[in-house]
Image (spheres, rainbow, N blue to C red):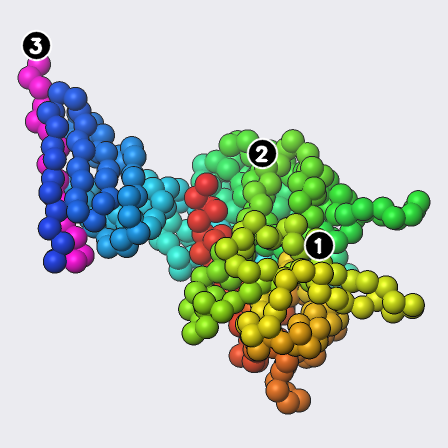
Amino acid sequence: MAATPPPPSFSLHSNKPSHSHSLLRLSSNENRTFFSFNSNLRCEIKGFESHRGWTIERVSDMSKDSANSHITNPSSPFLSVSSVTSASQFPTKNAKRVVLFYCPETKVLAEKIAAQTDSIELRNISWGKFPDGFPNIFIPNAQGIRGMHVAFLASFSSPAVIFEQIPVIYALPKLFIASFTLVLPFFPTGTSERMEDEGDIATAFTLARLLSNIPISRGGPTSLVTFDIHALQERFYFGDNILPCFESGIPLLKRRLQDLPDSDNISIAFPDDGAWKRFHKQLQHFPTIVCAKVREGDQRMVRIKEGDPRGRHIVIVDDLVQSGGTLIECQKVLAAHGATKISAYVTHGIFPNKSWARFGHDNGESAFTYFWITDSCPLTVRDVMNRPPFEILSLASSISASLQI
C-alpha cells in the first residue's frame, strides 16, 4: 500500500503584526485543514494529494474586522484573504484570461478595464470607411484568438455606430473562440420599451432581438453585460441565444457617499415611482424621499409624495438623464422644502445637444453640489470631464469583475 503523502505545508501571517493568530491543523488523512485566528475569519482549506495547490472551500466572516491576512503555500502565489472580500473575488492564478476588443468611443474605458488585472489583454480593431461611407473593418491576427475567451466593449451612441459595430459583434464568435461576451454599458433604446398607441414601435425589443441573433461561439450563447437597463421587464425581450447579465452602478455611488464629510446626513430622493421601484432596495439603508409628477392645468409639476428633506443633503437618483428637466424641477422643490444640499446621480448621462451645460458652474454657482455619472456614455464623459459639479464614477472595476463570471 502506498504511503500516505504528507500534509501540504503553508504559513499564515497578517498585515498587522500586532494580531496574534492561532492555527489548528487536522490530520492529513482527512485531506482538509481548518484554521482560525482572532480576527474572527475562519477558512477551510481542502488539499490535494499532489500538494501543488489547494482551494478555499468556505470562508466565514464573523466580524467586521477588515484586517488582511495571507495564506502561503511554497508552490503557490500569495492569496490575500480579507474579511470584507467575497471568496469569488480572490485573485488566483486560475483567473480567466480575456481578450478585450473595443470600439473607438470606448478606448479610454477599455484601457481602465485592462488596468484592473493582468488577466485582460487589449486588442485593436482597424476601423475604416470605404469612399461611399460604409464601414471597412479589419480584425488583425484573427487566428490568434482561437480558443480564447473574447469580449467586445461597445458603445451604441447613435444608429450609425451601431451599424459599424454589429458586423464585428457578429464576426467575433465565429472565429473559433472559447466564449464571447458583449459589454454594452448603456442599452440605448431602453426608454422605448412599450406601445402607447397602435403604430408605436418598441425599439428596445428590436435591439434586443438584434443582439439575440449573435452567432453562438464554441462555448455557447453570448453573454451580455449591461448596466441599469431602464425597465427590468426588458430582460424578457432577449432570446435564448444570449445570456443577459444586468449589473448596476449603484454600488459605485454608495462607495462615493461613504467618502463625503456629511455621509451621516444623506437622504436619497427618487424623482418618480419608477426610479423608486428600480433602486430603493439597493438604497434601503438611507432615508428616502419620493417625488411625483402631477398635472396642474396644462403643466406637469413635481411634488414631494413622501419623505422630509429638511436639513439633509439630498441625492437624487435615477437611471439616466436626457435634457435634465425633471432633475431641475426636483431640485427646486427639495430646496423649497429645506434641503441644505442637493446632488444627483444617474448611471447614464446622455445629455443630447449638450444639455449638461444647464448644470455647470460656468454661469454662476450650480444648484447641485455634486452630479455623479458613470462612464457608460463616453461622449458625455469627454464633454463634462473636469467641469464641476460633474464627477465620473468609472465602471471599469465592475466590468473587469463581470468578465470573470
Which residue sits at x=52%, y=59%?
Answer: 286
Vertical placement of 212 versus 91: above or below?
above
Disc 3 residue type?
Met
Q: Which residues are magenta?
A: 1-16
Q: CA distance from mark 3 to mark 2?
A: 48 Å
Confirm whether residue 100 shows in the render. yes
Say what secondary structure mark 1 lies in: helix
Q: Principal SS element in the magenta part?
A: loop
Residue 309 appears at what percent x and percent y? 61, 69
Query: Which residue in the rendered view is the most extreme toward the top?
Result: 1
Residue type pointed to by label 1: Asp
Q: Residue at x 52, y 67 (%)?
A: 266
Q: Judge left or right: residue 86 versus residue 239.
A: left
Residue placed at 10% from the left, 25% from the top?
27
Q: Is residue 297 above or below residue 1?
A: below
Assess disc 2: are there few (<14), some (14-19) or many (≥20) residues with their C-alpha within 10 Å of its C-alpha. Answer: many
Which residue is under mark 1? 273
Give the mark nearer the N terminus: 3 vs 1.
3
Q: Earlier in the sequence, mark 3 or mark 2?
A: 3
- Which numbered mark, 2 or 1, is in the foreground of this view? 1
Residue 132, label in figure: none
- In this view, the residue in front, 258 or 2, is 258
Residue at 42% from the left image edge and 69% from the top image edge: 259
Instruction: Decide whether residue 10 is among the magenta residues.
Output: yes
Q: Amino acid at mark 2?
A: Pro
Element under disc 2: loop
Q: Nearer the viewer, residue 75 or 135?
A: 75
Q: Is residue 345 left or right of residue 132?
A: left
Residue behind mark 2: 221
Label 3: how many residues lie within 10 Å, few (<14), some (14-19) or many (20+)? few
The answer to whether the residues at label 3 and label 1 have Cβ atoms under 8 Å apart is no
Which residue is disc 3 drawn over?
A: 1
